[in-house]
Image (cartoon, rainbow, N blue to C red):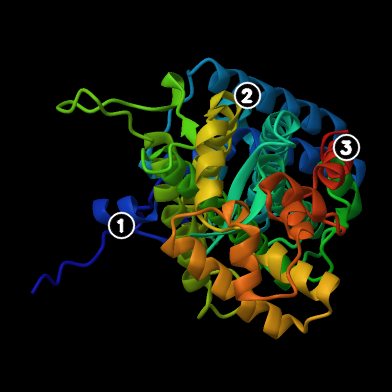
Amino acid sequence: MNKAKPKKNKQTSKIWGGRFQKDSSEIMKTINASIWFDKKLVFHDISLSKAHSNMLYSKSIISNIENKKIQKGLNLIEKEISNDKFVFSDELEDIHMHIEARLIQLIGETGKKLHTARSRNDQVATSFKMWVRDEVDLVLELIKNLQSALIFQAQSHINTILPGFTHLQPAQPISLAHHLLAYVEMLGRDKSRMEDAKERLNQSPLGAVALAGTSFPIDRFATAKALGFTKPMDNSIDAVSDRDFVLETLSNASIIMVHLSRFAEEIVIWASPGFNFINLPDTFSTGSSIMPQKRNPDAAELIRGKTGRVASAFYNVLTMLKGLPLAYSKDMQEDKEPFFDAFDNLKLCLKVAEGLIREVEFNIEAMGSMADLGYITATDLADWLVKECNIPFRDAHSITGKVVKHAERNRLTLDNITMEDFKTIDKRITSDVFKVLSLKNSLKSRASYGGTSPKVVNKALKQAVKKWLE
Ligand code: ARG
């Protein structure tokens, strides 16, 4: 057993090393260091430090000269980072300590005053919130671009008919524009969820310090304002231990990815020769290394594939947080990597989806021929029987079933069945029925609010431009 006592009077070089006699083990430094991922927060953390220092001066906690020195030092560090001259190392754990240590190197003793009335606990919560807020803004912009691409395509397809599916079985004729606008609506809700989250998260933790506040006469409202927050958070314990802003934005990101994934799945299906609804653009598809005839929908598949990755980032942070007592625990350092990864991939997928939809070519004929196959105006026939012959819907449904059976047996579309055959199935049917059996008339007839008729969709498109793009 190693009974050697630690040598007296020896200290570690760590910023927090006052009470320590030995340095951390190498493996401890490795697990403890977050610098390799939290260095992303550098500019946010420097802005935070500038605001904090200005506030310390305004409350006479530091002098004007000291504040000026600190501001100058922080500006220098910013330049070093931008010019790739800044040295990172495991020794200094995280971005907050890196900046502080470098500040002390650059401006000397005054640099040691910056950490007055603040802690890494409120610092990290604040810097990360600022990062998340910026990412939300980027995502909002990308969602808008994707909506604009969908609306752009929809504008030329108000009269393009395809079979609408339920259970992936041809159900009723719809227009391509109507189908694309469904995604525009989903993305609109995604956007508003992100906006909600942003509003909720936009309160400043800074000044909560370690967890209990401080005895210094700080002005939390001033730093909150300087950093673009609406106000300081009301409870200092909550301020340093809240990570629901990460959960909320990741859960919103997961929902967006699920929407993108459903869209991607449709691209994959539509590009398959059995459907042939779309021609994938060269720019967003790939070939096979062995099968020269192939054109693969990799872009869409990767969007679909990355959905699990984003959703698991949400579960990752959810699980990390669930057992943590208040206030800060180091576990929370694990909130950043999943967020960074999820949002990088989310942004990538939004951009790819936009490019793909802008450039895809729709195969109007193939959509039309599949619409012709599936007896998809059967509901129109049933509705006609209700409206024109006063037959209760359940009976109309059953009569229509017989008509479809007849058509299937004789390989006919519904509008090719003869009047004679209609009469044998039900005497009450008249030649007026042909008005509702064509795809075009069926489409036109669905003019209820939110329906697929070209007139309604035309209006919806105009509204969509106003609602989402202006
Ligand atoms: N790197 C840490 C994190 O990301 C910063 C906060 C450290 N706080 C502490 N009390 N050790 O969470």
The residue wearing badge 3 is 462
Q: Amino acid at mark 1?
A: Met
The answer to whether residue 35 shows anywhere in this view is no
Q: Which residue occupies 87% across, 58% down?
A: 449
Q: CA distance from mark 3 to mark 2?
A: 46 Å
In the rendered image, which quarter contains the C terminus? top right
Q: Which quadrant holds residue 401?
A: bottom right
Find disc 2 in the rendering and name its residue: 78
Task: Return the residue nearer the eye: 454 or 18.
Answer: 454
x 32%, y 28%: residue: 295
Task: Inspect the image, locate mark 3, and give the three-letter code of the amino acid beneath it.
Answer: Lys
Q: Which residue is mark 1?
A: 28
- Is 467 placed above or below 351 here? below
Task: Give the SS element for disc 2.
Answer: helix
Distance between mark 1 and mark 2 Cα atoms: 29 Å
Give amino acid for label 2: Glu
Q: In what element is the residue under mark 1?
A: helix
Left or right of residue 416, residue 17 in this image = left
* Farthest left residue in view: 1
Residue 14, horizontal then vertical, whole percent: 44, 48
**Left or right of 338, for residue 107:** right
Up-down: is 446 above or below 292? below
Residue 194 horizontal/vertical position (percent): 73, 53
Task: Rate crowding at label 1 as few (under 14), some (14 to 19) or many (20 or more) other CA atoms within 10 Å.
Answer: few
Q: Residues within 10 Å of mark 2 (few under 14, many from 20)?
A: some
